[in-house]
Amino acid sequence: MKANMEHHREWNTGKTRGILRKDTCSRLLFAHVLIGCDTLRIFGIGKQVALKQVQSNADFQRYADLFTDRYARREDIIDAGEKALASVHDGEKGESIHVLRYKHFCEVSKTNTFSEPHTLPPTSVATHYHSLRVYFQIQTWRETTENLKPEEWRWKLSDSQLLPIKTHLPAAPERLTKIFRCNCKTGCNTSRCTCKKMSIECTWMCGTYKGVSCANSIPVKLDAEDAE
């Protein structure tokens, strides 16, 4: 017993609360559930990232306050949840989660490392579902769910257990999983360009893509399918 106690750490919660301040402590529940608790989890994002957002990002603080509001509207929850997840994935202010996911996919595709879909930011639909579940979980812990049904907040009942409904869409449009990319250092205007040779346009995934200076590209526009 003594040997085990030598490695045991105790935290003074009163002192910790004083250091973090009352407003930060009131938002820790949101940061905890958004990134990952026993029932919900986002891949690859640590709690320290969310804590930093809680302490220094005024927008993130507003999102946290909304999720503790028992009368918050669903559309506001969905919008705030997407913006909060974009923040922890290093998105720029106002950048949507599907654009951020696309940019991360392009960056990874420039390397020789295989990328698993779960390492990317979630799709907008998965984010939508996750945000609703986060809200329901927070309200459950705050004991304010008397008028909330879990099935209406992206949970499903299976064998007497509530399980999360993750999404109803694939991780990416099929055409993106089969796309070619080049690594040209010139203007991609000859058949030496892999993309041009395959009669497809260059994209952000190409190694030295420079947009308007590339002779084999057009401005990137995400369609409705990509936006999911």
Image (spheres, rainbow, N blue to C red):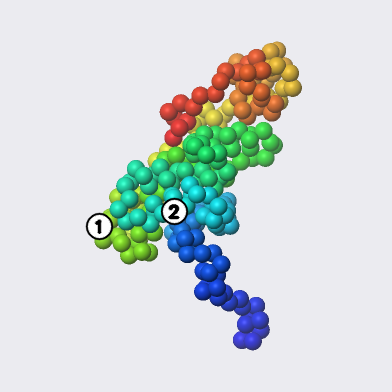
Say which amino acid is labelled 1. Asn
Q: Residue at x 66, y 18 (%)?
A: 214
Q: Residue at x 57, y 29 (%)?
A: 178
Alpha carbon distance from label 2 to label 1: 21 Å
Q: Residue at x 53, y 49 (%)?
A: 57
Say which amino acid is labelled 2. Ala
Number of marks in picture = 2
The spot of residue 177 in percent (x, y) is 55, 32
Residue 103, placed above or below residue 53: above
Residue 141, placed above or below residue 220: below
What is the quadrant of residue 135 in the picture? bottom left
The spot of residue 82 in percent (x, y) is 45, 43
Under circle 1, the secondary element is: loop
Viewer can see residue 171 = no
Q: Residue furthest bottom?
A: 2
The spot of residue 80 in percent (x, y) is 42, 45
Under circle 2, the secondary element is: helix
What is the quadrant of residue 147 in the picture? bottom left
Residue 5 or residue 80, whichever sits in front: 80
In-image side of 3 versus 62 (left or right): right
- Pointer 2 or 1: first along the chain: 2
Q: What is the crowding at mark 2: few (fewer than 14 residues within 10 Å), some, or many (at least 20)?
A: many
Residue picked out by circle 1: 147
Looking at the rendered structure, which numbered label has been put on residue 64? 2
The spot of residue 19 in percent (x, y) is 56, 67
Viewer can see residue 223 = yes
